Image (tube, rainbow, N blue to C red):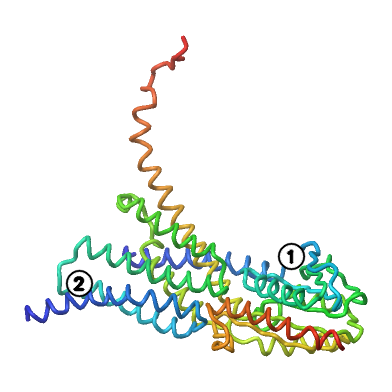
Amino acid sequence: MHRAAKAILSALVLVGVAGAVSAVWVSHAVKREVEAPITTLNVNGQTGKSLIVHHPGLTGFQEQVTAAFAEGLAQSGWRVDRTTASRQAPSDVSGYDLIVLGSPVYGGAAAVPLRDYIARVADFQGKPVALLLTAAGDADDAMEATAAAVTTERGKVVARLGYTTMRPNKAAATYSGSNSERAVAMARDAARALAPRAGGS
Amino acid sequence: MGTGASALAVAGHVLTAARVASAAPILTWAGAGHGRWAAGLLAFAMLTDLADGPLARRYGKPSRAGAWFDVWADFLVVAAAFTGLALAGTIAFWPLAAVVASFVGFLATPGVDGGIYDPVGRYLGAILMAAAAGMLWSQDLLLQQWLATTAGLVCLATTCVRLGFAVRIAQPRSGASCAPPKGSRSVSPSR
């Protein structure tokens, strides 16, 4: 075989092997539950008690957006319990006044651990639920599907917040910095704006 | 004919320079969330990569400096795209680290090409540019994670192969002075 053809074939085989290994690892990683203890912000918050359950994803973006949202809630006087979507997360939400569910969007849907968590809760008891999704380009379909799942489990969706990495987040004129910095600032402000409405419901 | 040929040879360098110049906007647009603008510019950079080498070989005098200019241009564009994607929160930082490691490995082992068979390394720039363009164009985190992980693994594999061969090539020289001659007995320095 010609040397150049041999080299190209070898490169294709090696890239193919790397692609296959990567496909197996990524499909496992996005479905894997990440266990984390509950951390609490603003323990003596008077506005109400909120629970944030999120899937952190494979990059730090969801974590940053969720942390900013938690800060916004705490600044508005909420006590914030935060954990990841795993079997360790509380499935009894009766002690909370607001539930926040967060996840990256993979293949047009929220990550499997968050969907499993919603199914495990089974009854949100009519409590207000805020959805906090991050996507590359468009979180709309995943938002609709997640909202429908929450509604089916008797949750009342009070906010649908989607932030993107490869499409400019809205309100560019209001916020400065990179796209991810804008998303973080927007999430913090959205939590501040959400607080009185959700608390009153 | 001579003037036209030299103009085409210069055009090769201009194309490489254009690739270098595209790195900054690719980084800026990727970080600002304009993924598809950055993907379009990266596609242009890939075209310049296809054209500059043949122009230089056909109409000019291929030089070592020109080859290094081409390598650095590829690295800058790829690094800009991966950095923008990482800053945007689309991919993790480890694939970017793997890209940098592979380039550092390439710089550290310039003399081993005659001794190693590295088919991936030869096409690494094109592979990484294609992966970056796919990530910038895609609107799906799952596909982006797969492309980033694949690119990172390819870079790590290439780096390991190059460094492994470099060590093997270097070993006989250093080993010759340390290893005792065949048939000799080892003597402890304390005795």
Of the 4 image quadrants, the one containing the N terminus of chain B is: bottom left
Which residue is label 1 attached to? A34
The alpha-carbon separation of the residues under discs 2 and 1 comes to: 53 Å
Amino acid at pointer 2: Ala
Which chain hosts label 2? B
Work out which residue is located at the far top of the displayed protein and give it.
Answer: B191
Which residue is label 2 attached to? B56
State whether residue A181 is above or below residue B67.
Answer: below
User: Which residue is at 37% across, 64% downward?
Assistant: A7
Q: Nearer the viewer, residue A183 or B70?
A: A183
Which chain hosts label 1? A
- Local SS, label 2: helix
Q: Quadrant of residue A91?
A: bottom right
Marking on residue A199: none
Residue B80: x and y in percent read 43, 71
Q: Is residue B95 left or right of residue A92?
A: left
Q: Are marks 2 and 1 in contact (CB under 8 Å)?
A: no
Residue A70: x and y in percent read 74, 73
Q: Nearer the viewer, residue A165 or B162?
A: A165
- Local SS, label 1: loop
User: Which residue is at 47% across, 85% downward?
Assistant: B36
- Mark 1 surroundings: few (<14), some (14-19) or many (≥20) residues within 10 A: some
Q: Are marks 2 and 1 on the same chain?
A: no
Q: Is residue A103 left or right of residue B182?
A: right
Residue B10: x and y in percent read 17, 75
- Mark 2 surroundings: few (<14), some (14-19) or many (≥20) residues within 10 A: many
State whether residue A40 is above or below residue B140.
Answer: above
Amino acid at pointer 1: Val
